[in-house]
């Protein structure tokens, strides 16, 4: 068996697919570590999931200016040297990079040491770190086939989808009802802005929760940085049938009790929605590379699994109406849920692990 380092993070869209692939590799007997930024999401989640965590540092990519780029190059070189030392100390055989600026030094360091390198890109438009790392990768894992043409390098590409944690598929309704204090016999809409939260989705959730004639319940995953702000919007007194949660590490329960999700459209979120078969109203983040979240969302909308609500020209009353019209139509929600389930790729983790083992075997790194 081999020793493998997962590298990357910053957001749930990087961290959770990495851990899903790591879980599959661990089940196959490999020793898996996590390299990341201890101050960001991976620094909290990976150790909690039982992974040995190595804290690294990496410079953020500059957006312009010669001096900034020179400084970045020097800092990156220092980060790569530090990653080389850590890889040697840990006797790592292969680095699996999942994006986020912290992923670049370990992947580049593995290249300089002749170790295996695999890169996973979750989105249609690849991030800067993966565009850099793809040049030296042995293999590139994709969610969308069209992404292959947007990445440099000659490494073979394989479309595997976004691996998800199998635990999200297990959502006990009774346990969820007790956890959230909600009645599963009444419609429930879940608002979630991703691991960091989203101000615009929170705005919509507050508006829905505040409706005096509301006939549905609200499960609102606020994000830790927004939780106090959302609570203050209710003057500290949350309405009946509304549950606020700052961060949920058992998303299977949240998915399992919800009838509709109002959320962003990152690749990981969509992979989870399709895996559990849940209808959604998608609010793509406008602050992403090449507007890739709207592209992701339109794909689910096209097959009838979701509706899309864009932020440009946002009308809050109209947005509330969109939520309530969907919740009032259980037949439509069921059809959307079934359409979502048809898009699921539940074998993504297995396929990714197969590619990793293929690279290890081809380089003689399987012990």
Image (tube, helix red, strand yellow):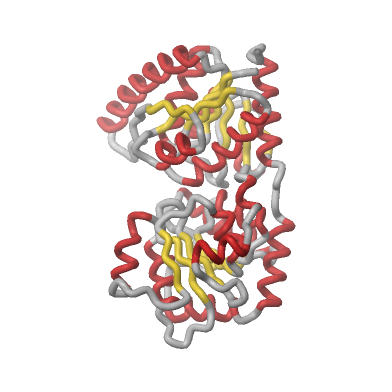
Residue 76: percent from the left, percent from the top?
36, 25
Across and down, in percent, residue 63 comes to 34, 40
Where on the picture, by quarter, is residue 89? top left
Comparing 357 with 182, the one in front is: 182
Residue depicted at 34% across the width and 67% down the height: 230
Question: Residue 363: horizontal and vertical position, in percent?
Answer: 65, 14
In the image, residue 75 sits, relative to residue 168, either above or below, namely above
Q: Is residue 183 above or below residue 9?
A: below
Q: Nearer the viewer, residue 115 or 249?
A: 249
- Say which quadrant the C terminus sits in: top right
**Residue 18: horizontal and vertical position, in percent?**
55, 37
Seen in the image, is 124 located left or right of residue 233? right
Q: Determine which quarter of the picture holds residue 141.
A: top right
How many circles with numbers are drawn on the protein? 0
- Residue at position x 70%, y 71% from top? 334
Where on the picture, by quarter, is residue 338? bottom right
Q: Residue at x 40, y 36 (%)?
A: 43
Residue farthest to the left?
67
Please say if 197 is above or below 54.
below
Determine whether 113 is above or below 67 in the image: above
State the residue in front, 317 or 90: 90
Quadrant showing the N terminus: top right
Report the side of 5 relative to 83 (left or right).
Answer: right
Residue found at x 62% / y 76%: 185
């Amino acid at each position: 068996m081999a020793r493998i380092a997962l590298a990357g993070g910053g957001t749930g869209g990087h961290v959770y697919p990495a851990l899903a692939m790591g879980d599959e590799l661990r089940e196959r007997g490999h020793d898996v570590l996590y390299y990341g930024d201890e101050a960001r999401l991976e620094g909290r989640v990976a150790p909690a999931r039982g992974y040995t965590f190595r804290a690294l540092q990496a410079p953020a990519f500059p957006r312009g200016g010669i001096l900034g780029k020179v400084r970045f190059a020097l800092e990156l070189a220092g980060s790569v040297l530090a990653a080389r030392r850590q890889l040697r100390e840990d006797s790592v055989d292969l680095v699996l990079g999942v994006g986020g600026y912290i992923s670049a030094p370990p992947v580049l360091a593995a290249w300089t040491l002749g170790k295996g390198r695999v890169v996973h890109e979750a989105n249609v438009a690849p991030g800067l770190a993966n565009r850099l790392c793809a040049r030296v990768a042995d293999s590139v894992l994709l969610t969308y086939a069209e992404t292959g043409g947007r990445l440099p390098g000659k490494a073979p590409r394989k479309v595997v989808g976004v691996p998800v944690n199998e635990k999200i598929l297990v959502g006990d309704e009774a346990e969820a009802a007790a956890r959230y204090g909600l009645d599963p016999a009444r419609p429930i809409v879940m608002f979630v802005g991703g691991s960091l939260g989203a101000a615009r989705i929170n705005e919509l959730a507050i508006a829905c929760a505040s409706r005096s004639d509301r006939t549905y319940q609200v499960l609102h995953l606020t994000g830790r940085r927004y939780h106090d702000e959302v609570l203050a919007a209710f003057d500290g007194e949350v309405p009946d049938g509304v549950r606020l949660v700052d961060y949920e590490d058992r998303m299977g329960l949240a998915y399992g009790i919800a009838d509709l999700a109002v959320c962003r459209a990152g690749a990981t979120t969509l992979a989870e929605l399709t895996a559990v078969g849940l209808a959604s109203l998608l609010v793509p983040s406008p602050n992403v590379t090449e507007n890739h979240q709207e592209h992701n969302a339109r794909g689910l909308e096209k097959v009838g699994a979701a509706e899309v609500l864009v932020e440009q020209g946002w009308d809050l009353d109209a947005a509330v109406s969109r939520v309530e019209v969907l919740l009032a139509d259980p037949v439509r929600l069921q059809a959307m849920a079934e359409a979502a389930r048809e898009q699921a790729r539940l074998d993504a983790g297995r396929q990714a692990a197969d590619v990793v083992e293929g690279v290890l075997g081809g380089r003689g790194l399987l012990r």
